[in-house]
Image: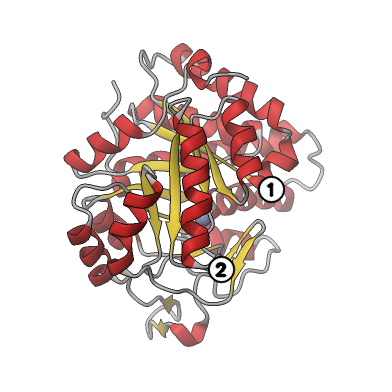
């Protein structure tokens, strides 16, 4: 048993309370390699933004859970080295799909876990979520749950269609499970292809797809039912077209990739939405930078020469999100 407190990490309780009061959201960035982690920590330290490091089940299998834990511990020390006196860093399991996985993460130094039982029938979702909450809270680890189903693909999680969260269920669910935050479905979606061309309109000037707006009426109804309760948005990458263009320009093939417009996320961040998950955007930045180097310098074979530019582009992306979309800069001095 390793407590996250020994690693210098924090859970999400205080982060979320402050974010809701302050009208901003905490960035939740997924990572599975060193360059991503360096970029996340550098961006967070330079902007003094609290941050959630997310590890999916797939990332945990890819990178090894022991190594990830030490990386998170190293991240805290690295942040201090960068001059961030009191780093507010949370290590969070993204989309835990069983009690055993969540328990293992709690036991291995995670400060927060998500149990995603949203694909189960309502009562089973409650029962499994409560079981995780009861275990995690013994160690002061916070728990995110999910109600409603997002469309799209993220590691092992995939669904063809979305089902909006039902506002009439949220009070019963939050009360009976004791969860600390709730991921809801209001039209965000996992992956770089959040919407089919049929779901979108096309901008006649640029020829680009314009996605359907998020269901802010559903969000408002949920906030009315659960005033001040921390709400989480998954699948909230914006799929920056500059990265998509770079990838396509340098030999990639991502036709009609489309995400959530940043204005809509900025609007959400000002509400009770206090955690916004961003994964695909950093994958796109990484890939765009690597493709550019490969295309322009075909003789390059030192991984530092293409992972380095990828890291720089991701750092820029994370800072942009923190400052211009989430508004979390300067909130953890
Ligand atoms: Zn997700």
Q: Quadrant of residue 188?
A: bottom left
Q: Is residue 274 above or below residue 239?
A: above
Label 2 Cα neighbours within 10 Å, binned few <14 / some 14-19 / many ≥20: many
Ranked by sequence position, the earlier of labels 2 and 1 is 1
Between 197 and 161, the residue placed more toward the observer is 161
Determine whether, in the image, residue 66 is placed left or right of residue 140: right
Where is residue 270? Give x, y as percent. Answer: 21, 50
Q: Residue at x 37, y 51 (%)?
A: 176
Q: Residue at x 29, y 67 (%)?
A: 167
Taking the image as drawn, is residue 112 in sight? no
Residue 15 on image: x %, y %: 31, 33
- Is disc 1 placed on a helix, strand or loop? helix
Q: Which residue is mark 1?
A: 58
Q: Secondary structure at mark 2?
A: strand
Structure colour scheme: secondary structure
Q: Is the residue indicated by label 2 positioned so its CB lies within 8 Å of ligand 1?
A: no
Residue placed most toward the observer, 327 or 247 = 327
Q: Quadrant of the C terminus?
A: top left
Residue under pointer 2: 152
């Amino acid at each position: 048993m390793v407590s996250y407190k020994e690693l210098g990490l924090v859970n999400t309780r205080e982060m979320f309370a402050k974010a809701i009061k302050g009208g901003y959201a905490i960035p939740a960035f997924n990572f599975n390699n060193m360059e991503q982690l360096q970029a996340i920590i550098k961006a967070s330290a330079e902007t003094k933004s609290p941050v959630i490091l997310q590890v999916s089940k797939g990332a945990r299998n890819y990178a090894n859970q022991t190594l990830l834990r030490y990386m998170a511990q190293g991240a805290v020390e690295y942040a201090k080295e960068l001059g961030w006196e009191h780093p507010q860093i949370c290590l969070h399991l993204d989309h835990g799909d069983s009690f055993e996985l969540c328990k293992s993460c709690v036991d291995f130094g995670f400060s927060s876990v998500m149990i995603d039982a949203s694909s189960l029938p309502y009562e089973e979702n409650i029962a499994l979520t409560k079981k995780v909450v009861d275990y995690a809270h013994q160690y002061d680890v916070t728990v995110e749950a999910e109600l409603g189903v997002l469309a799209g693909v993220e590691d092992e999680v995939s669904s063809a269609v979305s089902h909006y969260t039902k506002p009439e269920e949220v009070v019963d669910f939050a009360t009976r499970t004791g969860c600390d935050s709730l991921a809801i479905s209001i039209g965000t979606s996992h992956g770089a292809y959040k919407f089919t061309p049929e779901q979108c309109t096309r901008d006649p000037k640029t020829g680009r797809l314009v996605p359907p707006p998020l269901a802010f009426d559903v969000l408002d109804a949920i906030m009315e039912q659960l005033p001040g309760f921390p709400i989480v948005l998954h699948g909230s990458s914006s799929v920056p077209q500059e990265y998509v263009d770079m990838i396509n320009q340098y030999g990639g093939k991502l036709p009609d990739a489309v995400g959530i417009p940043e204005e809509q996320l900025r609007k959400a961040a000002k509400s009770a939405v206090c955690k916004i998950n961003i994964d695909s955007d950093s994958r796109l930045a990484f890939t765009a930078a690597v493709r550019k180097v490969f295309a322009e310098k075909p003789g390059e074979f030192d991984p530092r020469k293409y992972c380095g530019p990828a890291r720089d582009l991701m750092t820029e992306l994370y800072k942009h999100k923190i400052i211009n979309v989430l508004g979390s800069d300067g909130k953890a001095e």
